[in-house]
Every structure is written in C-alpha cells, then in structure tokens.
Image (tube, helix red, strand yellow):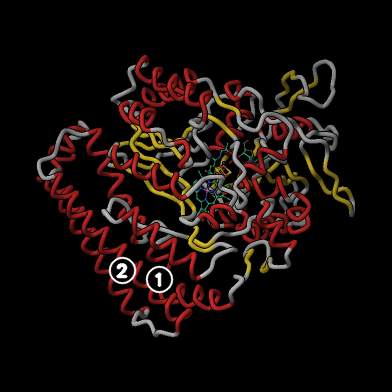
C-alpha cells in the first residue's frame, strides 16, 4: 500500500499542499570510511519527512550494492562523489546497476559533480541528474516529485540530461540557518581511540579564504548565499551533549574546513562555544579536534580552547617559502606559519599539518627551502613529517591557471602538470619510485600516520585517563623514533634532489628504505603496545571495563 503525506514542495514555486509518497525508500551510496557527514545530513533530512533511507558503502562489493538496489527498489539512488578521482569507479558501479536493470532515477552530488556537472553527466551517461552544492533541500524535492510522479525538471540546484543537451537550473541558495537541519544520521559503529568513540561533527560550513588549490571555497562560493555559516555555539554543544549521553561520545572531530576562529567575530564565536562547554558540564569530559589555518592560532584563545578540551589541531601550512605560499594563494607568511607551530608547542597541543612540497612553482631551491622549514618545525620529534604534491582539482583557480598556461596534463581521475624545470619531474618520479610514499607517508598503515596516531593517543591518555607512571619515558622514546624517521625521510629527499640537480648519485634505494621503514614500524609497535600492556589495568579500570581485564588475566 502506498503511503501519502501532505507536504509543501520546497522552493519550486508550488502553491498549496501537494502529496508526498514515501512508500519507496531512498538509497544513498558513498564513501563511508571514518563516517560521512554529508550523507548523514541528507539521510536525516529525508527521514524527518518520512522516507526510509538506506546508506550503502561505496567500498562494498558492487554485487552487494546491486543486491541492495534490487531488494530496496528505491525511488532514486543518490551517489556521493566527494573525491574527484573516484569518478571512474563510480562510473563502473553505476553502469553495472543500469545494465542489471535498476531503472530508478540516478542522481549524484558532491564537490566534483557540483562544480563540473557537465563533465560528470558526460562521463557517466547513466546518470539522470546532478544535485549541485548543498544537497539537503534539492534531494528532498527530487525524491518528492519523482515519488509522486510529477515533473522534477524545474527543481532549483539541479542539472540534468535533456536529450542531447545538459540543462542546469538556477542554483538554490546555501542553507542559511544550519541549525534548522536535524542532526546527521550516525547509524554506524564509530571508530575508537583507546576505548573512546570518535564522532565527527560540524560547527560551520564554508570557508572565507581563497587558497588557489582548494575546491572547498569554490564549492561554497559558487552557490548563492552566505559563504560561511556558523551554527549557534549552544546548538553545537547541545548536539555534543546528546552524543555524549546517547552514544558515550567523548572525542569529537570537527570537520569544518576552517574552524570559526579568525577575526574578532569568530573569536567571539569560539569563546562562546568554550563557555557553552563549561555551562553544559562537557568541559573536562570530552576532547575535540579542529582544522584551521596558521594565522588563526592565537595564544590566549588556544589556551582557553585547550583547557576546554581541544586536544588536536590540524593546520594547512602547505609551504615554507614565500613564493610557494603566493602560488597557493595562502595569504599568509612563512613567519606566521612558524609562529603558529611555536604557539601550539608552547601550549603542548598535539598537531599535524598539510604540506605541499611539490606544487607548480616548485624549483630545487624551493624544495631545499621547504625541507629546511620542515626540519625546523619537526626537529624536536613532536610530529612525523608528511608532505604531498599539489593536485589540480576541478573548479580550482590553480587548475584554471594550469589550463591557461597549457600546463595541465592527465585526465579527470589523474589531473597533473609538469614542473617548469624538467629535472624536477625526473626527481619527483625517482623519489616516488624509491620512497613508497603510500608506505611511508600516506595511507592508514603507513609509518608517518602510525607515528602520528601514537602521538594523538598520548594526548587522549593525558587528558582522559589517570596519570601513567612512565609516560615521560614513553614520550621521550616516541620523540626519538619520530626524529629518526623524519631524519631518514629528509635524507632521502635531499639525496635524491642532489642526484637530479647536481649529478651526485644517491645511496638510497628501495630495498634499503623498505628495511628502514619496517625497522621503524617494528620499534613503534613494540614500544606502543608494550606501554599499553604495562598499563592495561589502569586503562581498563578508567574505562570501567574491568570485565576485559578478567579476560586478559584468565
Ligand atoms: C571529512 C573529510 C574526509 C574524511 C572522511 C570522508 C567522508 N567519508 O566523508 C577522510 C579523512 C576519510 C578524508 C579523506 C580524504 N580526503 Co577528505 N575531506 C573531508 C572534509 C574535510 C569534510 C567532508 C564533510 O563531512 N563535509 C561536510 C558535508 C556536510 O558536506 P559534503 O560532504 O560536501 O556533502 C554535501 C554536498 O557535497 C552534497 N552532497 C554530497 N554527496 C552527495 C550525494 C547526493 C546524492 C546529493 C544529492 C548531494 C550530495 O550534499 C551534502 C550535504 O549538503 C572535506 C572537505 C569538505 N568541506 O567537504 C574533505 C575533502 C572531501 N577531502 C578531500 C581529499 C582530497 C581527501 C583525500 C584524498 C586526502 C588525502 N590526500 O588522502 C582523502 C581521500 C580518501 C580516499 N578514499 O582515498 C578533498 C576532495 C577534493 C576533490 N575535489 O576531490 C576535500 C574536498 C578537501 C579539500 N580541501 O580539497 N576526507
Ligand atoms: S585550503 Fe582550507 S583555508 Fe584554504 S580555502 Fe580551502 S578550506 Fe579554506
């Protein structure tokens, strides 16, 4: 039997009440590792209006996704493409579903399809439409109209295939009041750190800055409406309190691109947020992590935030040269980057940073300068160094510039560029052949991320557990290991650079490096696991999990 409910059609100029048919569910497919707030919000908005929503992990077997689609018989399937380089994989999944006879409406949202809707619809001919920019209201309207058999083609914020043409409707303004949205669906088992659930959350959407390599600010700037919207501090804390009480959430990851911190208005926002944490009794009971820029790191404000539970900071430093910062349009100086790191260290706040050692203006000189910068900030072994090559994502000013200067190479899944000095291309290639960047720097099982996880665990141990006797020794040992591993990485990059700039052969090869990498990983695991085992009684008691202790002893 069909279920019909009365509803006003959102924003398409409809007058009066229409009928909503919620008898068929909506299926959403996306990347779910470490949770997905975008899909969570879409699902909760639809559910609030009576729809059954199934969120399916894009990483599960395509046959499993097909089975789900067959058994659900959804009114539409929404695909979430937030990582541009996944488009080929989405294409093959969507093609498979269509070939197998799934004939409901297929739509897609996320950064790439929003900014490059034409390419997305051309690349994936099986797609019927693209929901551009923030998707909550547009997706709901799409489901409503399709479900009730009405014409959906006039929906604001939608681009769709119209015969051989592609039509893009006028855009829908960004959501003005984020607090009107229900809390995002979080119907999953959260990741844990030392027995504490980690929950992602948003305090704001959008970013006021204009870094040339970033698709975020272009995403929020391209739609009408206010680029940055902050929630009310009291509402954010209410959500945290709800998660604390209902899910036992103690570690919150703010996924805001740029936590509201910069300038007097947002500093006031953060102070109010901190005050709310105290008012609600959460300060001292929960930890939270933010991402921000270096120029927002104010010593006094960060000291207050630290006292209220801030335990980890991710900063996009991106470059240690003035020229690089200019190319990346960071509107910040090397001095400001250095100062921010110094402030965090003085406050004993754990941090990590984004760094683009390779970008389109790179030269051997800039690589040297950047390595000197990196050495300076990590010389005390407080964080494992990581760096990457800038990728020119669609919709970004730097990609447009590379197109304009005829330097853009590759395709939508592997966008790239050559350096101005061809020796640098050979250097980069050789470096990635010798250093398996995925084994050392990137990827969850790699050395640098593993070391940094150990550091973030220490912040949790120091803030959520009773004092542990040999913590100082453990920290010192981890610092030495971090220093040694950073040093090997620096040596390799420097030696490889010298080989290609000065013809001096490098003595590093892949075997030697793999040996070093594994040696570091082995010592890390031994050191970290040894420490945890020594303290497991105290840790389990603090978590009220003595039952596990009995198990361990038996
Ligand atoms: C959290 C996060 C992660 C997390 C979790 C991702 C997840 N499962 O959600 C982790 C840590 C895993 C991650 C990893 C990476 N990330 Co990331 N990540 C983010 C971040 C900071 C927040 C995502 C978020 O929660 N946003 C808030 C929600 C509400 O917004 P949203 O996701 O955009 O969803 C809205 C709309 O896009 C739209 N929408 C989205 N999907 C759909 C689907 C449908 C059907 C509809 C209708 C609408 C719709 O509606 C949603 C609600 O309004 C974004 C930046 C950002 N602001 O989005 C980067 C971002 C998505 N990441 C990015 C990148 C590059 C990466 C990495 C490659 C980094 C790296 N070097 O390793 C990896 C890739 C992982 C992999 N699989 O290989 C880039 C993607 C760039 C691009 N154009 O491709 C972004 C945009 C950051 C940036 N500054 O450039 N990431
Ligand atoms: S990189 Fe960060 S600060 Fe720069 S525009 Fe993007 S989100 Fe904003």
Q: Is residue 461 left or right of residue 262?
A: left
Label 1 crowding class (10 Å Cα cut-off): few <14, some 14-19, many 20+? many
Q: Secondary structure at mark 2?
A: helix
Q: Nearer the viewer, residue 42 or 468?
A: 468
In this rendering, the count of numbered labels is 2
Q: CA distance from mark 1 to mark 2?
A: 9 Å
At a point 64% along the width and 62% down the height, the residue shown is 413
Kindly indicate the quadrant of the structure image that contains residue 303. top left
Q: Nearer the viewer, residue 326 or 239?
A: 326
Q: Is residue 392 left or right of residue 542?
A: right
Q: Nearer the viewer, residue 476 or 30?
A: 476
Q: Position of residue 86 (x, y in %)?
A: 60, 57
Kindly indicate the quadrant of the structure image that contains residue 440. bottom left
Kindly indicate the quadrant of the structure image that contains residue 438. bottom left
Q: Is residue 30 left or right of residue 394?
A: left
Q: Secondary structure at mark 1?
A: helix
* Label number found at residue 453: none
Splitting the image into four quadrants, where does ligand 2 fall? Answer: top right
Question: Which corner quadrant holds the N terminus?
Answer: top right
* Residue where numbered disc 1 is placed: 493
Q: Is residue 173 above or below residue 507?
A: above
Q: Position of residue 182 (x, y in %)?
A: 56, 24
Label 2 crowding class (10 Å Cα cut-off): few <14, some 14-19, many 20+? some
Q: Is residue 101 above or below residue 502?
A: above
Q: Earlier in the sequence, mark 1 or mark 2?
A: 2
At a point 34% along the width and 82% down the height, the residue shown is 507
* Residue where numbered disc 2 is placed: 488
Q: Position of residue 192 (x, y in %)?
A: 34, 41
Q: Is residue 9 above or below residue 433?
A: above
């Amino acid at each position: 039997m069909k279920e019909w409910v009365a509803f006003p059609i959102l924003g398409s100029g409809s007058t009066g009440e229409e009928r909503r048919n919620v008898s068929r569910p909506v299926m959403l497919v996306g990347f779910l590792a470490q949770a997905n707030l975008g899909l969570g919000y879409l699902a909760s908005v639809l559910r609030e209006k009576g729809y059954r929503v199934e969120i399916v992990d894009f990483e599960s077997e395509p046959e499993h996704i097909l089975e789900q689609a067959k058994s659900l018989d959804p009114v539409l399937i929404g695909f979430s493409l937030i990582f541009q380089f996944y488009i080929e994989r989405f294409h093959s999944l969507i093609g498979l579903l269509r070939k197998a006879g799934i004939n409901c409406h297929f739509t897609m949202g996320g950064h790439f399809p929003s900014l490059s809707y034409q390419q997305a619809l051309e690349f994936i001919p099986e797609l019927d439409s693209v929901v551009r920019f923030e998707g909550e209201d547009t997706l709901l309207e799409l489901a409503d109209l399709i479900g009730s058999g009405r014409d959906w083609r006039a929906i604001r914020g939608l681009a769709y295939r119209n015969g051989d043409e592609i039509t893009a409707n006028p855009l829908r303004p960004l959501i003005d009041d984020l607090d009107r949205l229900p809390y995002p669906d979080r119907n999953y088992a959260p990741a844990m750190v030392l027995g504490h659930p980690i929950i992602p959350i948003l305090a704001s959407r959008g970013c006021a800055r204009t870094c040339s390599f970033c698709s975020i600010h272009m995403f929020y700037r391209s739609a009408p409406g206010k680029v940055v919207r902050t929630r009310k501090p009291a509402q954010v804390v209410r959500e945290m309190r709800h998660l604390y009480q209902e899910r036992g959430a103690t570690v919150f990851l703010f996924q805001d691109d740029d936590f509201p911190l910069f300038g007097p208005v947002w500093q006031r926002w953060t102070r109010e947020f901190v005050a709310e944490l105290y008012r609600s009794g959460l300060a001292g009971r929960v930890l939270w992590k933010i991402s921000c820029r270096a120029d927002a790191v104010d010593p006094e404000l960060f000291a207050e935030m630290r006292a209220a539970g801030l335990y980890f900071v991710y900063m996009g430093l991106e470059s240690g040269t003035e020229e690089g910062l200019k190319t990346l349009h960071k509107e910040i100086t090397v001095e400001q980057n250095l100062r921010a790191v110094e402030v965090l260290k003085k406050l004993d706040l754990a941090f990590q940073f984004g760094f683009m050692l390779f970008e389109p203006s790179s030269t051997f000189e800039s690589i040297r300068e950047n390595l000197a910068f990196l050495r300076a900030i990590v010389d005390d072994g407080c964080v494992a160094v990581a760096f990457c090559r800038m990728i020119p994502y669609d919709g970004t000013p730097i990609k447009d510039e590379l197109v304009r200067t005829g330097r853009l190479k590759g395709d939508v899944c592997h966008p790239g560029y050559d350096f101005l000095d061809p020796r640098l291309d050979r250097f980069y290639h050789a470096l990635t052949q010798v250093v398996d960047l995925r084994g050392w720097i990137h990827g969850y099982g790699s050395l640098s991320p593993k070391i940094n996880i150990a550091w973030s665990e220490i912040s949790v141990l120091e803030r959520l557990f009773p004092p542990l006797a040999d913590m100082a020794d453990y920290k010192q040992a981890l610092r030495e290991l971090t220093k040694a591993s950073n040093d090997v990485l620096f040596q390799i990059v420097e030696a490889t650079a010298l080989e290609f700039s000065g013809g001096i052969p490098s003595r590093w090869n892949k075997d030697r490096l793999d040996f070093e990498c594994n040696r570091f990983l082995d010592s890390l695991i031994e050191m970290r696991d040894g420490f945890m085992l020594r303290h497991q009684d105290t840790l389990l008691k603090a978590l009220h999990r003595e039952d596990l202790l009995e198990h361990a002893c038996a």
